[in-house]
Amino acid sequence: MNFLRPKSTLRLVLTGFMVVMLPLVAALVIATMSVDRLVTHGQQALLQSVFVTQGSQVLVETVRAMERNARQYQVLGDQVLFNVYKENHERFNDAVRGLDSQDLAKEQRQLLENLRASEDQLHTLLLNHSHDAPEVASAMPTFIEMGRVAQQILVNSQDLISRGVQQMQSEAEGVQRTLVLQALALVPAAVLLTVLFTVLISRPVRQIDQAIRRLGDGSFADTPVISGPSDLRQLGERLDWLRVRLLELEQNKTRFLQHMSHELKTPLTAIREGTELLREQVAGALNDQQGEIVAILRENALQLQKLIEDLLNFSIVQSHATTLSTAPVEFNRLVEEVLADHRLAMLSRQLEADLELQPLVVEGDREKLRVLVDNLLSNAIKYSPDGSRLTIRLVKDDGSARLEVGDNGPGIPPEERERVFEAFYQGAPANKGPVRGTGLGLSIALEYARAHGGSIRVVESTCRGACVQVNLPVVQGA
């Protein structure tokens, strides 16, 4: 099977072309040989028929001439007439020898032998007796019988032509059937060979495409396996080298995010604690302007803390170290708690919430579910216009808890509804807020929803803006 695994794709394509063409060329050669054989046989049969017919006609004419010369010689006794008879006798013998050399039927050959024997006896008689001998006179009716025999040979020769034509038609039909059977056998064989080499050529290309897609999706665990020609296998080796490099870069990025996040948390903690001490006026009373400055510092410190926590959560997700400490969680109460944490941000933006929360219990990690809900609410608040309303619904839907968080912001275009769950992808900028997000919130929400056996997506809703729907399994009987 080495011919199926040549050293290059070009050789594989050329080999496939030659192998696929082989049965077609064989069919063409066989068809040409069959037609050539049929034509040759037809020509031979036609020439034989023409020669036999011509010989038979000569035979009939010669017998008549001999009869005429013999009768004239019998009456006149002229030696010249007898010489003419002998010349016709030689023509007769030539015609008989010519017909005897042909492939005659058994009946026709027997007639020819009888005719030759009769003519020999008559010729011997004329040579050995005088023209007026009684034996010569009694032998003259023999020419009449010879003429009938010669005529019968001519008729049989014409029948031979008809039989030859029928035989040629039969052979032509046989050749036609043979060519049809060959086509029925060889065309499927060519199709099967075409399919075989199509698979052999397309399989490594498909494997390369799948390997590239896995790398594009961030899956670096599986080694690309490329089968086929050597040049494509070498390309697979280069893809594996690229996979290893990307894996190293991903690991370096994850370590960098982890280290950076931890390093940022230490000074941020000090800033938050100092801001809280100032806000509580532990170091002394603050005037109104100083209080506003402290409030701004506190709000931005909280936003910065949220960004750092997103980076930490993303690092955990990327390192596939997500572990769940599962327990029954009253999901409706959890949503209320997260909403309470955002109460000040909503008041500052004059936002209100339309709540519809059914009491539902889910089995999950309370802290990660809290992060999931917090990211959804943070996005909704960030993209909502001042003075607008949020829609928060939690209902039971076919054995799952369905949470919908909608806003009246600019919305998410249909072509971006899948991409918003990609890490670091950011859509239109938020209406308010000095700090732009990292683009990790929905990516983390997606991973945590999947970790709980649920799903998350952007759906159409009655809200003017975006609506994100989360489905999580509920505890049965709770």
Image (cartoon, grey):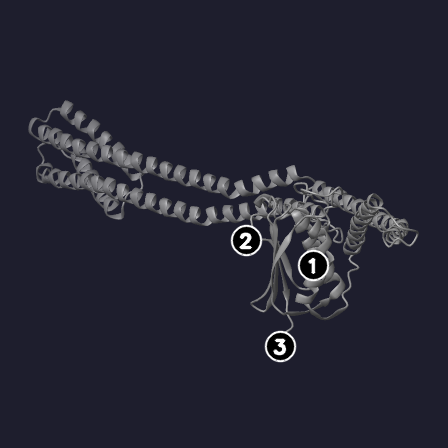
Mark 2 or mark 1: which is in front? 1
Q: On the image, numbered disc 1 is attached to which residue? A: 339
Q: Are discs 1 and 3 less than 8 Å apart at CB?
A: no
Residue extending furthest toward the left? 75
* Label 3 crowd bin: few (<14), some (14–19), many (20+), radius 10 Å: few
Q: Is residue 418 above or below residue 136?
A: below
Q: Are discs 2 and 1 less than 8 Å apart at CB?
A: no
Amino acid under disc 3: Gly
Expressed as whole percent of the image width and height from the top left, the position of residue 382 reads 68, 47
- Would residue 16 be visible to someone looking at this image? yes
The foreground one among 219 and 96 is 219
* Label 2 crowd bin: few (<14), some (14–19), many (20+), radius 10 Å: some
Residue 336, picture quadrant: bottom right
Amino acid under disc 1: Leu
Mark 3 vs 2, N-terminal side: 2
Q: On the image, numbered disc 2 is attached to which residue? A: 461
Mark 2 vs 1, N-terminal side: 1
The foreground one among 249 and 275 is 275
Q: Residue at x 33, y 38 (%)?
A: 42
Residue 68, picture quadrant: top left
* Label 1 crowd bin: few (<14), some (14–19), many (20+), radius 10 Å: some
Kindly state the secondary structure of the residue where label 1 is placed. Answer: helix
Kindly state the secondary structure of the residue where label 2 is placed. Answer: loop
Q: Quadrant of the C terminus?
A: bottom right
Q: On the image, numbered disc 3 is attached to which residue? A: 477
Mark 1 vs 3, N-terminal side: 1
Kindly state the secondary structure of the residue where label 3 is placed. Answer: loop
Q: Are discs 3 and 2 less than 8 Å apart at CB?
A: no
Kindly report the distance in space between the C-alpha atoms of the residues bearing marks 1 and 3: 27 Å
Left or right: 304 in relation to 68: right
Left or right: 447 in relation to 75: right
Amino acid under disc 2: Ser
